[in-house]
Structures are given as C-alpha cells and as structure tokens.
C-alpha cells in the first residue's frame, strides 16, 4: 500500500486514526505522571524536614490524593491495542480499542497456562 505505514495497513483507517491520536498522547501522560511524582516527592520531603510552613497540612490526605491522581493518569495511559478487538472497541476495553499496562498484564496472565509444578 503506497503512502501508508505498516501499522496503517494492519488496521482499518478509521481505527488507525483513532488509535494514532490516543497513542500520540502517551508521552504527555508519562510527563504528567513524572510531574505528579515530583510534586508528591517534593512536598513529602518538606514533611520529612518538619517544615513549619506546613503546620496543619493534611499529609496523609495529600499523599493519598496524589496516589489517586497518578493512578488515574496511569489507567488513562494506553499501553497496547486491545488484544480482544484489535482496536475496534469491545466490552473488554470499554470501547476504547486499547488497554493500559495493568489491564494488558491481567489479560496476558489470564491467557498463560498455569505454572507447571516441579516435584
Ligand atoms: Zn477491545
């Protein structure tokens, strides 16, 4: 197929364009995750130093909220085209056509045969 990349040849064009847009955002999401960790670590280091600036600050709440934000970013980060629908959208991927790393790992583990017991 002239003028089309190998990926475009594999997926129908509408699915390819949707997935291309989604996967193009991965770098942005990775950057936001790093920024989230940087903010979380920076503020928590101030806690370690018992900074008087933060007297009364909800450290546990802050840490939990940052974990939640970072977790939401991770779950919104596409890792693979959905292995069940190949990007078309299905119940497994919530019609997104892609899965995040955690979801992909879960699907992979479910597809693998059980471990062999060694006597
Ligand atoms: Zn799917």
Image (cartoon, grey):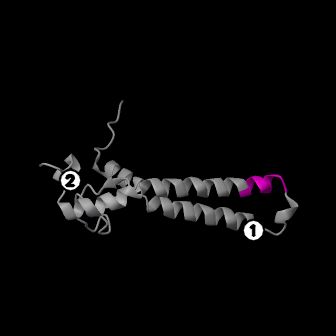
Q: Main secondary structure of the magenta part?
A: helix
Whichever of callouts 1 and 2 sits on the residue coming sooner in the sequence is 2
Taking the spot 50% from the left edge, 61% from the top edge, the residue there is 73
Can residue 78 be seen? no
Say whether mark 1 is within 8 Å of ligand 1. no
Question: Could you classify mark 1 by the number of other residues whose Cα lies within 10 Å: few (under 14), some (14-19), or many (20 or more)?
Answer: few
Split into 4 quadrants, where in the image is the C terminus? top left
| SS state under label 1 | loop
State which region is magenta. 43-50
Using the image as rendered, state which of residue 55 and residue 1 is in the foreground: 1
Instruction: List x then y, in percent, for residue 69.
Output: 56, 64
The residue indicated by pointer 2 is 8
Can you say whether 18 is above or below 7 in the image? below
Question: Could you classify mark 2 by the number of other residues whose Cα lies within 10 Å: few (under 14), some (14-19), or many (20 or more)?
Answer: some
Taking the spot 64% from the left edge, 53% from the top edge, the residue there is 38
Please say whether residue 47 is one of the residues in the magenta stretch: yes
Q: Is residue 51 shown left or right of residue 118?
A: right
- Residues at circles 1 and 2 in contact by the CB criterion of under 8 Å: no
| SS state under label 2 | helix
Instruction: List x then y, in percent, for residue 3.
Output: 17, 50
Instruction: List x then y, in percent, for residue 26.
Output: 42, 55
Question: Nearer the viewer's eye, disc 1 or disc 2?
Answer: 2
Q: Is residue 37 shown left or right of residue 22?
A: right
Instruction: List x then y, in percent, for residue 10.
Output: 17, 52
Using the image as rendered, state which of residue 99 and residue 20 is in the foreground: 20
Can you say whether 57 is above or below 47 in the image? below
Say whether mark 2 is within 8 Å of ligand 1. no
Using the image as rendered, state which of residue 39 and residue 119 is in the foreground: 39
Instruction: Report how far apart the C-alphas of labels 1 and 2 lie in the structure.
Output: 49 Å
Taking the spot 71% from the left edge, 64% from the top edge, the residue there is 60
Taking the spot 45% from the left edge, 53% from the top edge, the residue there is 27
Looking at the rendered structure, which numbered label has been put on residue 58? 1
């Amino acid at each position: 197929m002239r003028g089309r990349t190998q990926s475009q040849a594999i997926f129908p064009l509408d699915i390819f364009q949707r997935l291309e847009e989604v996967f193009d955002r991965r770098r942005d999401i990775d950057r936001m995750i790093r920024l989230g960790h940087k903010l979380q670590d920076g503020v928590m280091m101030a806690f370690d130093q018992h900074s008087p600036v933060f007297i009364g600050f909800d450290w546990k709440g802050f840490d939990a909220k940052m974990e939640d934000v970072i977790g939401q970013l991770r779950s919104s980060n596409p890792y693979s085209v959905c292995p069940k629908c190949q990007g078309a959208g299905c119940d497994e991927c919530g019609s997104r056509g892609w899965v995040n790393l955690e979801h992909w790992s879960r699907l992979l583990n479910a597809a693998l045969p059980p471990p062999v017991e060694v006597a």
